[in-house]
Amino acid sequence: MKRTGFAELPLHDGKAPQWLVERMIKLAREIVAIIVDEHGREFFLKRVSDPYWFQAFGCVLGYDWHSSGVTTVVTGVLKTALKGEDFGIVVCGGKGRASKEAPLEIVKAGEAFNLSTGKIESLQYASRMSGKVDNAAIQAGYPLYHHAFFVSEDGKWAVIQQGMNINDRTARRYHWLSDHVENFVVEPHKAIVGDARRPIVLDMTARESEECRKTSVDVAKERTEKVARMFEMIRPACQRSLQEWVPNMSTKEWKDYVAEFLSMPFTINWKALKRAYEVQPRNYEELLGIKGVGPSTVRGLALVAEIIYGDKPSWRDPVKYSFAYGGKDGVPYPVDRKAMDESISILREAVEKARLGDRERLSMLQKLRRFVPPDAKI
């Protein structure tokens, strides 16, 4: 599966006022009804997995392009807007504690859609693994706090989840789409969106991390006593700095880097590694799926694979997209006019056909105009 983006957002205090949320629900219901009616459920899932479209959609409903509430509030609004309506799409999970309700809500949605037990279990697996990948396999300093799982009556799914970096109060948004997932641990995202690129990020999903993934599995299949000896060999007492292993990192970049947790972990979940020895995982996806295998264990195995066996993981930040469309001067990258035009066209058509008053329709179209660069036409 191909990754198409990452998103970093400035976080804001406070919450959306109830009057705004109620209006957003109404507007979202109208827009989604038109899109599903005109293009179908699968098309809608494809749209929400597109960071450009999702960002424009949030702006139309009432948010600025850079607001962190675009993720949490808009997905919450969609969860309410799609509830009880005959759209054939349900949103499970949400922010904080609500994200833990996703597995049960997936069961309820699957039963309502008459999906088989096997299909429901595969949907639960997709929800769990998408969270595991973005929490552990990619380590950029953004532990997840939001997980929204979209599922259709056809058994298709999409994920929008977000992680927060408490050090610099930014967030990253991760998009997934079922049709693009060929392997959960090899560049599986439809999008990961962000404005800033970190100097180093442990990315075990990168294609160049393939040998490191294989070696990590091989190490995890060894007896825990042997694995423990490997970890002891590369403890901080035997090393000066992780900086020495990461190429092209200046002293200043390292000093300013906020994700300090990328150093060799002092604690390892030995119960999880014992479980791995008993299970003998066939591949990295099975290893990552073992209960208790989290960021520290993933990082420890990756560093053992690199330092002892010479199989390096990718330390390159996979962020590729910004919440904005880019700059006309090419910074941070050239404007993707085709993606922009497609997003705006779909939303404009849906707004114009929605059963809204003239004032609401005009207001939403004006928001679309503010979302695009001055020289763009809609």
Image (cartoon, rainbow, N blue to C red):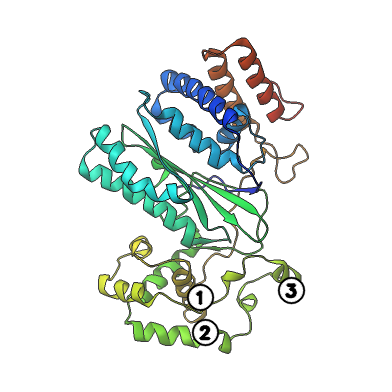
- Residue at 53%, 19% (x, y): give it: 350
- Secondary structure under badge 3? helix
Q: Residue furthest left?
A: 117
Pick the front one: 239 or 83: 83
Pick the front one: 322 or 93: 93
Residue 234 marker: 2
Above-or-below relation of 158 to 297: above
* Residue 183, visible in the rendered structure: no
- Side of 240 relative to 284 (left or right): right
Distance between the Cα atoms at labels 1 and 3? Answer: 20 Å
- Amino acid type at image mark 2: Ile
Q: Quadrant of the C terminus?
A: top right
User: Sequence-wise, which precedes: disc 2 or disc 1?
Assistant: 2
Distance between the Cα atoms at labels 2 and 1? Answer: 8 Å
Assess whether mark 1 and mark 2 are in contact (beta carbons under 8 angstroms): yes
Above-or-below relation of 225 to 118: below
* Residue 92, visible in the rendered structure: yes
For disc 3, the marked residue is: 251
- Side of 62 relative to 306 (left or right): right
- Residue at 57%, 70% (x, y): give it: 262
- Amino acid type at image mark 1: Leu
Mark 3 Cα within 10 Å, few/some/many (few <14, many 20+)? few
User: Sequence-wise, which precedes: disc 3 or disc 2?
Assistant: 2
Residue 303 marker: 1
- Residue at 52%, 84% (x, y): give it: 234
Residue 366 image position (x, y, % from top left): 69, 21
Number of numbered discs on residues: 3
Pick the front one: 276 or 328: 276
